[in-house]
């Protein structure tokens, strides 16, 4: 029986597959639906990736004991992420009225990344 793989490598692969899904979706949406749909896809994908990376960082901080926290740096990073998340959501809401398919595809890039990682793990289990 093989030992479990390093969680950081798994998260990195999920992120990479999600970015690949964004590129494929962006090319498709850009050609088929146009610039407004591409903007909706990009903003909703940004919201999803920010939330995913934020959740990853929070889980990592909670699971690993640290000697000291830099409260000021943590506060500025949190405020910057909230601002970026707010701007991306604002643009997504305004463009969602024009093309909901692009917004749904943008929100699904992390799901595609997780599905890709599951397919990779399944392939690896059958290969060994």
Image (cartoon, rainbow, N blue to C red):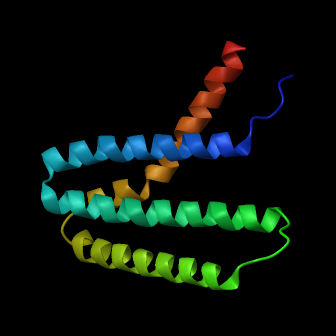
Q: Position of residue 34 (x, y in %)?
A: 12, 54
User: From where the camera sits, is residue 114 visible?
Assistant: no
Q: Position of residue 28 (x, y in %)?
A: 22, 43
The answer to whether 94 appears left or right of 83 in the picture is: left
Residue 3 lies in what quarter of the image?
top right
Most extreme residue toward the top is 127
User: From where the camera sits, is residue 69 visible?
Assistant: yes
The answer to whether 32 appears left or right of 109 in the picture is: left
Q: Which residue appears at 35% of the width and 53% of the height? A: 105
* Tally of marks: 0
Question: Which of the two residues, 89 or 98, is positioned nearer the viewer here?
Answer: 89
Locate the C terminus by quadrant.
top right
Q: Which residue appears at 24% of the width and 77% of the height? A: 94
Q: Is 7 located above or below residue 37 in the figure? A: above
Q: Position of residue 66 (x, y in %)?
A: 83, 68
Q: Is 15 located above or below residue 59 in the figure? A: above
Q: Which residue appears at 31% of the width and 71% of the height? A: 92
Q: Which residue appears at 28% of the width and 75% of the height? A: 91
Q: Position of residue 1 (x, y in %)?
A: 87, 22
Residue 69 lies in what quarter of the image?
bottom right
The answer to whether 72 appears left or right of 51 in the picture is: right
Q: Is 127 located above or below residue 104 in the figure? A: above
């Amino acid at each position: 029986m093989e030992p479990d793989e390093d969680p950081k490598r798994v998260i990195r692969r999920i992120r990479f597959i999600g970015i690949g899904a964004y590129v494929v979706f962006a090319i498709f949406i850009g050609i088929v639906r146009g610039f407004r749909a591409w903007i909706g896809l990009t903003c909703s994908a940004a919201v999803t990736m920010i939330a995913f990376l934020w959740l990853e960082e929070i889980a990592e901080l909670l699971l690993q004991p640290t000697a000291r926290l830099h409260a000021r740096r943590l506060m500025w990073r949190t405020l910057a992420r909230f601002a970026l998340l707010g701007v991306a959501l604002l643009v997504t809401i305004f463009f969602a009225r024009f093309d909901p398919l692009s917004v749904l595809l943008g929100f699904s890039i992390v799901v595609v990344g997780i599905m890709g990682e599951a397919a990779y793990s399944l392939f690896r289990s059958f290969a060994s």
